[in-house]
Image: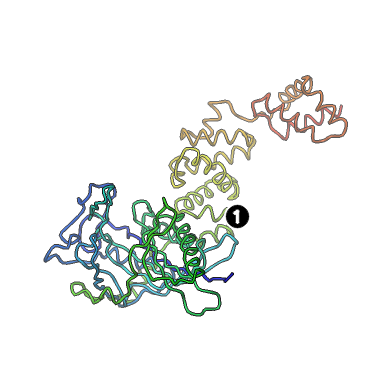
C-alpha cells in the first residue's frame, strides 16, 4: 500500500478583546443579546458610513504577534477583500493582504510522545468579522449582524503540522496563549475563537503538495482533530481509487462524522484585493513596538520552566499549574504564604493539584475559581497544621474540603469540630491497649508476633478507626510495637 504524507496548516480566527468593534464605537459585548441589536451604520455598511480604526485592537494584535515571536511590521495596510455572501453586508470585508501587521513567528507544541515541535506562523493580520447565518429547520436562513465588525485576528500557520493530533495541540496551545495575555476570551462555543484547517495528502516521494482542501469554521479542539482524521482518509481513498482531489472548501458535520463539500476553493485573485481607500496605512516606530513588548506578561512556557527550576516541581506538575494564568498566579501567592510559616512549594503544588482540582471537578467549577473558593492563607494554614502535628493527613483533607465549601479558616474548623490530632502518649496508650484487647485484633496480633510485620498496619487502622482518624500515626505505630514486644 502506498505511503502518504499529510500536510496541514491552520488559520485561527480570534476575536480581539476590546470594548468596541473594529471600525466604529459599537459595543463589542454582544454575547447573549437579541439578534441585530449590537449594530451600527458602519457594521451594517450603510451608504456614507466611514470606518475609524480601533487603536486598542491594533495594540493587542501587535502584543499577540510579539507573544508568538513574530516581527511587528513598521508599515501595514488595510485592504478590501471582495466576495458576495449573505453575512457580509457590504459585499467586501476590510482585511489585510500583502502588508499584514505581523509576520514570521512560531508556536511550540509538545506531542503525546513528548516530541517538541515548532510550528511556523506565516502572518497575523487584522480584519472585521462577518455576521452569522442561522439556519432553520424549514431550510430558511436568518442573519444576525451582532458579530459583524468585531475586531478579529487571523493567525496563519505555515504548513508545518503533520497530523490531526498536532493540529489539535496547536489549536489548544494558541487558545492558552491568547487567553493568558488577555487578548481573547477563549470562548469557542460563542465563536470568539475558531479555525479553518487546510489539509492535503501526497504519496511519499512526491515533492509538490497535493491539492489543498479547507475545512471551515471549526470551533472545537475535538472537532478539528476528528475532521482532519476523516478528511485525510477521504483523500487517500480517492487517490487509491485512481481519482483526483479538487481544491475546495468543506464543512465538518459532527452528527454525520464527515466533511461535507460546500464550494470550490477560491484563490487570492478571486477576492480582488485592493488598498482600503478610507483607512490610511498604519505606521509604527520602534518605540511603539517596544511599548507593546513591555505589556507582555511572563508567557506560559517560560513560567512553567521557572516553576520547575525555582520550586523543584516535575514537568507535569509545573505544566498543570501554568495551563491558566489565574491558577499560576494563585499557586505563587500560596507558595509565598506557605513559605512564611515553613511550608514548601511542593506541598502547595500537591494540595492544589490533588485536593483543590478534585474539589473543583466534583463541584463542576472552573479552575480559575479556586482563589474565590479557598484563600491562599487557608492553603498555607492546612500545610502548617499538618507540619505541627495538629492534623493527620486524613483529617487535613477533611479540613481542606470544609474550608473550600464554607470559606472558614482551617484553624476555626479544627477547633469547632474537635479535629485536632491526638498526640498525648498516655491517652493514646489507653486506646492502643483497648484495641489489642479486642477479639478482632487477635489474628493480626498473632501474625505480627509470628514475624509478619505487615500485620501491624491492620492494627494501626483499628486505632485510627477508634479515634475517628485523629490518632498520630507515628505515635500509634511506636506504641503498638512497644506493646506487642512485651
Residue 328 visible in the snapshot = yes
Left or right of 50, for residue 162? right
Instruction: Compare residues 46 and 19 and report the one nearer the observer.
Output: 46
Residue 298 visible in the snapshot = no
Mark 1 Cα shell of 10 Å, populated few (<14), some (14-19), many (≥20): some
Residue 2, by quadrant, is bottom right
Where in the figure is residue 282, as x and y percent of width and height?
27, 74
Q: Quadrant of the N terminus?
A: bottom right
Say which residue appears at 29% left-offset and 49% top-offset: 31
Say which residue appears at 64% left-offset and 26% top-offset: 468
In the depicted structure, whether residue 342 falls above or below residue 407 = below
Instruction: Compare residues 120 and 285 and report the one nearer the observer.
Output: 120
Seen as rendered, the residue at the extreme left is 48
In the depicted structure, whether residue 142 falls above or below residue 237 = above
Residue 427, by quadrant, is top right
In the depicted structure, whether residue 170 falls above or below residue 362 = below
Where in the figure is residue 367, as x and y percent of width and height?
47, 46
Left or right of 178, for residue 449? right
Q: How many marks?
A: 1
Which residue position holds label 1? Answer: 313
Left or right of 246, for residue 430? right
Q: Quadrant of the C terminus?
A: top right
Left or right of 127, for residue 452? right
Q: Secondary structure at mark 1?
A: loop
Amino acid at each position: 500500500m502506498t505511503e502518504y504524507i499529510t500536510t496541514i496548516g491552520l488559520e485561527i480566527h480570534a476575536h480581539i478583546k476590546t470594548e468596541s468593534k473594529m471600525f466604529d464605537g459599537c459595543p463589542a459585548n454582544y454575547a447573549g443579546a437579541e439578534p441585530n441589536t449590537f449594530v451600527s451604520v458602519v457594521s451594517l455598511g450603510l451608504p456614507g458610513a466611514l470606518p475609524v480604526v480601533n487603536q486598542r485592537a491594533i495594540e493587542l494584535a501587535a502584543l499577540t504577534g510579539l507573544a508568538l515571536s513574530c516581527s511587528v511590521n513598521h508599515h501595514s495596510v488595510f485592504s478590501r477583500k471582495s466576495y458576495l455572501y449573505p453575512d457580509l453586508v457590504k459585499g467586501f470585508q476590510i482585511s489585510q493582504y500583502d502588508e499584514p501587521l505581523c509576520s514570521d513567528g512560531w508556536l511550540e507544541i509538545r506531542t503525546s510522545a513528548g516530541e517538541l515541535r515548532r510550528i511556523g506562523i506565516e502572518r497575523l493580520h487584522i480584519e472585521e468579522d462577518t455576521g452569522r447565518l442561522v439556519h432553520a429547520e424549514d431550510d430558511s436562513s436568518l442573519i444576525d449582524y451582532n458579530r459583524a465588525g468585531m475586531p478579529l485576528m487571523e493567525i496563519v500557520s505555515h504548513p508545518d503540522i503533520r497530523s490531526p493530533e498536532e493540529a489539535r495541540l496547536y489549536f489548544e496551545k494558541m487558545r492558552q496563549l491568547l487567553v493568558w495575555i488577555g487578548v481573547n476570551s477563549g470562548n469557542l462555543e460563542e465563536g470568539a475563537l475558531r479555525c479553518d484547517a487546510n489539509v492535503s495528502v501526497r504519496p511519499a516521494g512526491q515533492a509538490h503538495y497535493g491539492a489543498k482542501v479547507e475545512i471551515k469554521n471549526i470551533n472545537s479542539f475535538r472537532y478539528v482533530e476528528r475532521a482532519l482524521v476523516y478528511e485525510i482518509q477521504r483523500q487517500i481513498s480517492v487517490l487509491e481509487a485512481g481519482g483526483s482531489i479538487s481544491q475546495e472548501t468543506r464543512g465538518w458535520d459532527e452528527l454525520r462524522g464527515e466533511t461535507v463539500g460546500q464550494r470550490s476553493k477560491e484563490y487570492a485573485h478571486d477576492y480582488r484585493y485592493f488598498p482600503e481607500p478610507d483607512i490610511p496605512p498604519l505606521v509604527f516606530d520602534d518605540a511603539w513596538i517596544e511599548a507593546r513588548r513591555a505589556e507582555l506578561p511572563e508567557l506560559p512556557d517560560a513560567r512553567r520552566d521557572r516553576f520547575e527550576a525555582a520550586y523543584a516541581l516535575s514537568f507535569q506538575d509545573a505544566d498543570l499549574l501554568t495551563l491558566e494564568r489565574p491558577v499560576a498566579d494563585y499557586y505563587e501567592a500560596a507558595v509565598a504564604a506557605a513559605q512564611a510559616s515553613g511550608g514548601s512549594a511542593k506541598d502547595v503544588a500537591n494540595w492544589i493539584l490533588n485536593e483543590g482540582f478534585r474539589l473543583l471537578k466534583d463541584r463542576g467549577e472552573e479552575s480559575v475559581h479556586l482563589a474565590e473558593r479557598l484563600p491562599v492563607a487557608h492553603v498555607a494554614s492546612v500545610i502548617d497544621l499538618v507540619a505541627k502535628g495538629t492534623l493527620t493527613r486524613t483529617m487535613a483533607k477533611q479540613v481542606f474540603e470544609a474550608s473550600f465549601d464554607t470559606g472558614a479558616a482551617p484553624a476555626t474548623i479544627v477547633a469547632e469540630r474537635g479535629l485536632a490530632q491526638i498526640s498525648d502518649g498516655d491517652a493514646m496508650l489507653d486506646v492502643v491497649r483497648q484495641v489489642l484487647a479486642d477479639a478482632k485484633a487477635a489474628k493480626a496480633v498473632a501474625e505480627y508476633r509470628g514475624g509478619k510485620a505487615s500485620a501491624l498496619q491492620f492494627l494501626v487502622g483499628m486505632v485510627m478507626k477508634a479515634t475517628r482518624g485523629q490518632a498520630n500515626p507515628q505515635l500509634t505505630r511506636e506504641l503498638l510495637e512497644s506493646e506487642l514486644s512485651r
